[in-house]
Amino acid sequence: MSNKVKGTLAVLIAAMIWGGGFIATSKSLDSFPTLTMLAIRFSLSAILILLLFFKRIKLMKRQEFLKALPLGVFLFLAFATQTYGLNFTTVSNNSFLTAMNVVFTPYLGWLLYKKKPSKTIFFASVLSLIGVSLLTLNGFSFKLNIGDGITLIAAICFSLHVLWASKVCDIDHVITTFVQMSVAGVISLIGALLFDSEIKEVSLSSLYSLVYLIIVATVVSYLLQMYGTKHISPSMVSILLSTEAVFATILSVILLGEKIDIKSFISILLMSIAVFISSRDESALDTIEEPV
C-alpha cells in the first residue's frame, strides 16, 4: 500500500470519526460552557498523547515546537469561532459555511505559498461544496448574518490549519499533534477563566461524550489527520475532511434508523466523485514544506 493511499485512508477515517461526533459535542455542551469544554478536551488530549508517546515527544526540538505552535492557535480559533457563530445562526448554515474551507484551502495555498491548484482539484472542491450544501441547507434561501460571518472566519481558520499542517509535515506527526493540543488547551483555559460561566451539573451522558471527544475525536483523529497530511496535499485533505457530513448522514441511518432521501443520495454521490477524482490527480500528492 502506497503512502498516498495510507494518507488518504487516515484522513477518511478521521472524517468518519468526526462525522459521528456531533452528538457527543452537543451532549458535552449541555453541562460544560464552550471554552471550558474546549480547555478540558484539548488539555487532557495533550496529557494523554504525552503519556502514550513520551519517548518520542521528549526528543522534540525547540524549533519544532515553534514551527508547530501556529497549529494550536488556528485550531483554537477555528473551534471557538465555529461554536460562537452557532449562537447566532442555524446549524445548517453553520455546517455549510464551515465546509467552505474546502474551497478556501486551494486558493489560500495559492496566495500564501504560490502553489496554483490544478483544475481537477478546483473542480473536486466545488463538487464537495455542492454536496455539503445539499446535505446541510434547507431550500435555496440564504441570508448572511453576524453568526454566518463568524462561521466564515472559522472556515478560514480550518483552511489555515490544514495548510500549516502540510508545512510542518517534516516533523513527527505525534509531536505536531501534541503541540497543537497543548497550545489550544492553554488558550482555551485562559479564555474559560476569563469569560465562561460556572459548570452546570454534570450528567453521565455529558461525561461519556467528553471522554469520547478526548480519546477518539481528538487524540485518534488528529494523529490520523497529521499522518495523512504528510502524504497528500492540503487541498485533498480538505476535500476528504468534507466527507464528515456524508459519514454523519450514513451513521444516522445505521444508528438512528433515519431515511436517505434523494437529495442526500445525490450529495453522497457528488462527494464520492470529488474524492475519487482528487485522488487520481498527481498534484494531490504534493505537500507544502517551505513557503516561497
Image (tube, rainbow, N blue to C red):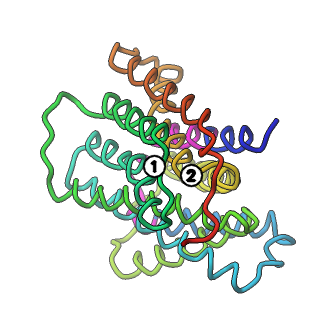
Q: Are marks 2 and 1 in contact (CB under 8 Å)?
A: yes
- Residue drawn where x is 72% and y is 62% of the image: 173
Tell me the kind of residue under disc 1: Thr
90 vs 96, nearest the viewer = 96
Q: Which residue is mark 2?
A: 213
Task: Verify whether residue 20 appears in magenta.
Answer: yes
Mark number for residue 25? Answer: 1
Identify the residue at image location x=27%, y=57%. 85
Q: Is residue 12 above or below residue 83?
A: above
User: In the shown orientation, is residue 101 left or right of residue 1?
Assistant: left
Q: Position of residue 256 (x, y in %)?
A: 47, 23
Is residue 59 on the magenta stretch? no
Amino acid at the residue labelled 2: Leu
User: Relative to 12, is 122 on the left or the right?
Assistant: left
Residue in the image at 24% along x and 55% along y: 87
- The residue sitting at 54% across, 30% down in the picture is 277
Q: Horizontal and vertical percent for residue 86?
A: 28, 53
